[in-house]
Amino acid sequence: MDRRKPLQEWSVETDIVVVGAGACGTAAALAAADRGLNILLLEKTRRVEGNTALSQGMVPAAGTRFQQQAGVKDTPEAMAEDIFRQNSYESDPELSLFLCRESKALVEWLVDRVGVDLRLITDFNYTGFSQFRIHAPPTRTGRELLAQMQAATSQRSNIQLVTECPVRFLLTDEAGNISGVVAGVTSEERVKCRKVILACNGFGANREMLERYCPEIAHALYFNHPGNTGEGILWGMELGAAVEHMDAYQAHASIAASQGLLVTWAVILNGGIQVNKEGKRFGNETRKSYSEYAQRVLRQSEGIAYDIFEEKTYQAVLAGFEEFRQLVETGAVKRADSIKGLAQVLGLDASNLKSTTKAYNAARLAGMDEFERTTFGNELRPPLYGVQVTAALLHTQGGLKINTRAQVLRPDGSVLPNLYAGGGVAVGISGSGADGYLAGNGLLAALGWGKVAGEDAANSILSSS
Ligand SMILES: Cc1cc2nc3c(=O)[nH]c(=O)nc-3n(C[C@H](O)[C@H](O)[C@H](O)COP(=O)(O)OP(=O)(O)OC[C@H]3O[C@@H](n4cnc5c(N)ncnc54)[C@H](O)[C@@H]3O)c2cc1C
């Protein structure tokens, strides 16, 4: 198809096209709509879900009024330092610090302007966090977060959401500047616009790209949204954009695969352990993150592990996590009044499981175990709970290089005119591989760059008209 048809053949005209209606796209549309521009929000799938709806909706931010109310003293610099420490100082320092500085305004904007109910979580903290700074909806689900953002978009008459309308490629004018998109399944609508914001996530659902860029996780379970097939990154590359950290991804070491539910890592952080099929532990579960630990799980027999935890942890997680309540309802979480009973019901070697819990409890008193774990939580004693899990790829973290205005950049640092990217399309703040992902990096980059891109695209249109 000729990508430079004359103007009279446009089917629709708008100010800004946003590609993808997850956290990034919805934030971008809302931010731009607040400045009075017309937005066409195009979503490939029938339902508005994306990776965002599958997530736990946890958004990190430093210096918010919710932290202040809870007596938490935090700064964007401390937040950035946690991110850098996790990714071994590999992520772009300017972009990472910028997002941290924007995070307070982002969370307060989501609450005050968009109408999302976000609350500071203080009942547990992820490894690598120097402060309580995760803000999440009451159910701790991305579904609730996105539903509230969607409710806000439906109240803005200048945002038009069209579902089942994949963008198929970008259009450029004679000078090579982005001038529109082609979208649709059966018919091909040529949409003219002044700015395009790519918010269509990474390539978690594209096996070919995974094999090329992230081979170590390409064949693991993909626990994510099928819409994320990487075209946003490919379009950018075709236009000459730079990409960075294409081998980066977020994995998770605790997925109840048969039930299709994530078992929150809070079960481990509250004092739980993971054992393999022999009933033995295989590492320090709290060394870095559930993302880093995923490869260890995959190295166990059949890639299977079991989360083992005690009553107080069970009750705390049950009270805090909607998804865990759903998991309990499926019957996947087994309970027993003895270690032998739990081993039986999970099909593990009872004597190994007994030695494992005994060694763990002794190490807990000593302050360090054989794997150098130093954070232990509650003593592991019956009644005990267990659930079979595996590790999975959640989403990719590499992508198009952007600047602090979320504009897409060429390798020489120049801007690709009229093109923005955020969330999984843009390079993340996790460095390379799986180890650098700190909990919350995904939504921070999706919501943060979405808001920045929407504001900047709108401001630049307004200032040029
Ligand atoms: C189980 C799980 C738990 C997670 N928990 C957290 C958490 O608590 N905190 C956190 O920070 N991160 C978490 N993450 C990561 C987080 O979900 C993602 O980083 C974030 O949702 C990405 O948002 P996005 O807007 O970039 O992409 P998405 O939400 O995936 O939205 C992209 C949308 O673009 C659409 N699309 C794709 N191609 C096209 C096209 N050609 N045309 C039109 N539309 C298109 C897709 O269908 C999709 O709806 C989690 C991920 C998973 C899987």
Image (cartoon, rainbow, N blue to C red):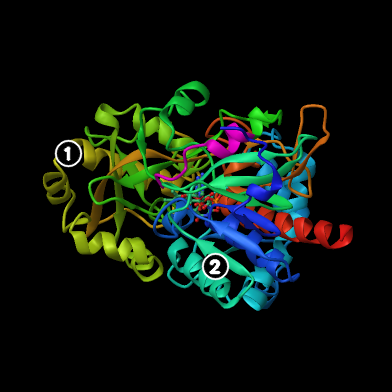
Q: Quadrant of residue 24?
A: bottom right
Asked if residue 298 lies left or right of residue 105, the reply is left
| Mark 2 secondary-structure assignment | loop
Q: Nearer the viewer, residue 137 or 143?
A: 143
Is ligand 1 less than 8 Å from the beta carbon at label 2? no
Asked if residue 332 lies left or right of residue 220, the reply is left
Location of the C terminus by quadrant is bottom right
* Residue 93 in view, yes or no: yes
User: What amino acid is at disc 2?
Assistant: Thr
Mark found first going from the N terminus, 2 or 1: 2
The residue at which mark 2 appears reads as 122
Asked if residue 27 lies left or right of residue 294, the reply is right
The residue at which mark 1 appears reads as 348
Q: Nearer the viewer, residue 229 or 247?
A: 229
Say the numbered circle drawn on residue 49.
Answer: none
User: What amino acid is at disc 1?
Assistant: Leu
Give coordinates of residue 319: x percent, y percent: 37, 71
